[in-house]
């Protein structure tokens, strides 16, 4: 028998948060399928804890340094091999799956952001930090690259049969075909220059689909501009020649004069979807596959000043530490919050929802807290399927971790193992009638949890009605 004036079950039920979080809307304007926060949880058939992390290195590699670069180098052709490379302090090292370290070099300029780039044509990985002359490693020999006009690159990327790089001066230089020993330098035709003021900040490989054919290209970024580098013939004569050879058809064109990036580690290819990056105006931009015009997808994780800081809190001083990585149907965005110069917070973009339910728009979960990692890389060849990261807080020391470790709900942070704390906040509900005073006799939850004791807070827009109430388990 229903009580008089009882709110119907339909109005009293909370919908699943299939639209994820919305930090931009005011609390009372959240839709029933949105949430105010989903700290350390995702929606996947229900609200679930994100998985925790597991340290690879049992002890710190350096007690006062953070990991500044990481990469899995797959090589060997007919005799496949693989090595995990990390950069920290003055060192480039190999880290085994049991955390053993083999130092390859200890003479790098200390504590610089370091990029690794595998070039399969020569079966080598190239290493740059914007200060030291480019290094190379073939799985056996680590060396300083020798030759003519060898740069000290800020960033490296391959296109067709050559490498390109961004120099400390912010220009783009190129190599001879299938060679890393001869580079252009201030050439009138081989050096690429921006059409707008300011240096290039990043170059990134992209595949272009035209008339059903995939062509290789590079996206080139300035802080506030986007370019496309294309070509099928980059020249057969040396890049040090005075003029371009016949048939050379490389080109650079401005795609957008207002959207770029100051966060090179944030540029990320998403299979079947496109390329995304963190913009200098503190948003996330997606260039769909096959399109030269992109869209902003980060509006819902820009806070309006509520209880959860969003991507608007990234400072210009540390914007270069922002990173994004695609892994297992999620785009993981890591950002430093406030004055921190290391990443403290992640937001996860649900690619499963975006592809299968485009009508929902961008769906984000987070904030994911408890980890301080920034250099995140995927290891997914030769039977690998892991997400690996380096510690980004120098005070914690140089540790390397597996992220999203199966059946693990604690985070490895230095030598500690901290519980992953889930906090889910529903939208404010009028329960079907905005003016009626409600008396809550009981609330019922469908929960699945393995450890800990769940609690509940009940809040009105202007006050806390109940805080930390225990939830009694009536069935298992």
Image (cartoon, rainbow, N blue to C red):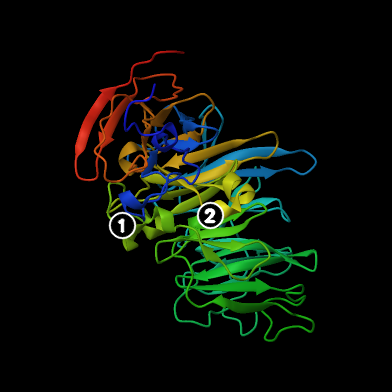
Residue 227 to residue 32: above or below = below
Sequence-first tag of 1 and 2: 1
Pointer 2: residues within 10 angstroms few (<14), some, or many (20+)? Answer: few
**173 on left or right of 334:** right
| Residue 404 higher or lower than 175, as above or below | above
* Closer to us: 255 or 351: 351
Answer with the quarter of the image where residue 319 lies.
bottom left
Question: Crowdedness of circle 1 by 10 Å Cα count: few (<14), some, many (20+)?
Answer: some
Give the residue at x 50% y 78%.
Answer: 257
Residue 475 image point, x, y percent = 44, 13
Q: Residue at x 46, y 22 (%)?
A: 448
The residues tagged by marks 1 and 2 sit, at their Cα atoms, a distance apart of 20 Å
Report which residue position mark 1 lands on: 304
Across and down, in percent, residue 29 comes to 35, 52
Count of marks overlaid on the render: 2
Q: Secondary structure at mark 1?
A: loop
Q: Position of residue 268 (x, y in %)?
A: 56, 55
| Local secondary structure at mark 2 | loop
- The residue identified by callout 2 is 361
């Amino acid at each position: 028998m229903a009580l008089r004036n009882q709110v119907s079950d339909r109005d009293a039920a909370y919908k699943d948060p299939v639209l994820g979080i919305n930090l931009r809307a005011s609390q009372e304007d959240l839709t029933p399928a949105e949430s105010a926060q989903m700290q350390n949880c995702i929606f996947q058939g229900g609200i679930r804890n994100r998985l925790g992390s597991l340290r690879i290195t049992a002890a710190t590699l350096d007690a006062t340094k953070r990991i500044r670069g990481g990469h899995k180098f797959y090589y060997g052709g007919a005799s496949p091999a693989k090595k995990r490379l990390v950069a920290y302090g003055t060192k480039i090292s190999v880290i085994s799956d049991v955390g053993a370290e083999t130092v390859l070099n200890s003479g790098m300029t200390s504590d610089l952001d370091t990029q690794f780039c595998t070039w399969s044509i020569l079966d080598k990985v190239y290493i740059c930090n914007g200060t030291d002359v480019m290094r190379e490693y073939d799985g056996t020999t680590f060396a300083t690259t020798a030759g003519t006009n060898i740069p000290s690159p800020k960033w490296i990327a391959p296109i067709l049969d050559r490498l390109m790089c961004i120099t400390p001066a912010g220009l783009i230089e190129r190599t001879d075909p299938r060679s890393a020993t001869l580079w252009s330098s201030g050439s009138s035709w081989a050096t690429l220059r921006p059409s707008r003021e300011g240096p290039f900040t990043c170059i990134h490989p992209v595949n272009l689909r035209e008339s059903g054919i995939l062509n290789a290209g590079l996206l080139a970024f300035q802080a506030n501009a986007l370019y496309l580098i294309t070509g099928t013939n980059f020249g057969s004569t040396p890049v040090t020649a005075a003029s371009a050879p016949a048939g050379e058809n490389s080109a650079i064109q401005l795609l957008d004069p207002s959207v770029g990036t100051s966060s090179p580690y944030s540029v990320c290819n998403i299979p079947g979807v496109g390329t995304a990056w963190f913009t200098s105006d503190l948003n996330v931009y997606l260039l769909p596959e096959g399109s030269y015009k992109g869209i902003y997808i980060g509006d819902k994780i820009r806070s309006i000043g509520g209880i959860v800081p969003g991507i608007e809190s990234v400072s210009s001083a540390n914007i270069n530490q922002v990173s994004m990585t695609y892994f297992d149907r999620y785009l993981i965005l890591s950002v430093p919050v406030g004055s921190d110069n290391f990443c403290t917070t992640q937001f996860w973009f649900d690619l499963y929802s975006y592809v299968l339910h485009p009508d929902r728009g961008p769906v984000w979960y987070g904030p994911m807290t408890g980890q301080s990692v920034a250099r995140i890389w995927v290891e997914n060849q030769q039977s690998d399927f892991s997400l690996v990261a380096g510690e980004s807080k120098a005070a914690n020391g140089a540790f390397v971790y597996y992220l999203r470790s199966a059946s693990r709900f604690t985070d490895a942070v230095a030598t500690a193992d901290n519980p992953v704390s889930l906090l889910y906040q529903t939208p404010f509900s009028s329960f079907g009638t905005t003016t009626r005073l409600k008396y809550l006799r009981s609330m019922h939850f469908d929960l699945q949890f393995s450890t800990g004791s769940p609690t509940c807070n009940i809040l009105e827009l202007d006050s806390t009605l109940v805080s930390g109430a225990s939830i009694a388990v009536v069935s298992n």
